[in-house]
Amino acid sequence: RQPLWISVYGEDSARVVGMFVVTLGLIALIRHSSAMLQELEFLSFHDSLTGLCNRRMFQKSIAAKGQDIFALMLMDLDHFKTINDKFGHDIGDLVLRGIADLLQRHCAERGEIFRLGGEEFAVLMGDASQSEIEQFAESFRQRVASLNGDDKTRVTISIGTGLRRRGESSSELMRRVDRALYRAKDAGRNRVMSSE
């Protein structure tokens, strides 16, 4: 027979080791769950193709501005459906990623960049005048146009701009700038139109 103190000590040791192993397992599970939640949160607010913030984050960012004055650029690639139809969606995706990369290089220091869906992008700028946002938009439009090789693969962009007016709701600003974007399209595309 084994002495009582050995069996008590052995059981206690086994319990302690077991609790330690369970604790390590719980810590690993919590870390894994936390990493998964962070990844899910990132995916819920970012576009999987371009890595830019998505429409949900755009709405959240605008709501966070409250009654602040800010500038908005809405942009749309011209004849993007033709690019997809002619060259395939893989090439279309490359074009979208290229535009997103160009936006990040051109705008990241001054504003927040979003892909709203399809070939639509937006930029929010907190500290710009109407003339600054127009110059900024025109500079970006020219950068996109300068990337073109020949007329068969021509990529251009139409842009609407606007500065939020005092007392104007975010949805009113969005409608106003959206109308400016469609005026740019109706006027022949590849241009910037102000909503002022």
Image (spheres, rainbow, N blue to C red):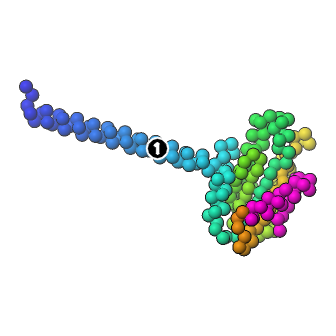
Horizontal side of residue 24 vs 8, given as left or right: right
Q: Tell me which segment is drawn in magenta.
A: 172-196
Q: Position of residue 67 (x, y in %)?
A: 66, 70
Q: Pick the residue in front: 104 or 42.
A: 42
Q: Position of residue 127 (x, y in %)?
A: 70, 68
Q: Position of residue 100 (x, y in %)?
A: 73, 48
Instruction: Mark 1: give few (<14), some (14-19) or many (20+) Cα within 10 Å.
Output: few
Residue 67 drawn above or below residue 6: below
Rendered residue at 84%/54% (across/down)? 158
Residue 32 falls inside the magenta stretch? no
- Could you tell me the amino acid type at mark 1? Ser
Horizontal side of residue 31 vs 47, given as left or right: left
Q: Quadrant of residue 126?
A: bottom right
Q: Secondary structure at mark 1?
A: helix
Q: Which residue is mark 1?
A: 33
Residue 190 falls inside the magenta stretch? yes
Rendered residue at 29%/40% (across/down)? 20
For residue 142, say whether it is visible.
no
Residue 174 drawn above or below residue 89: below
Horizontal side of residue 85 vs 116, given as left or right: right
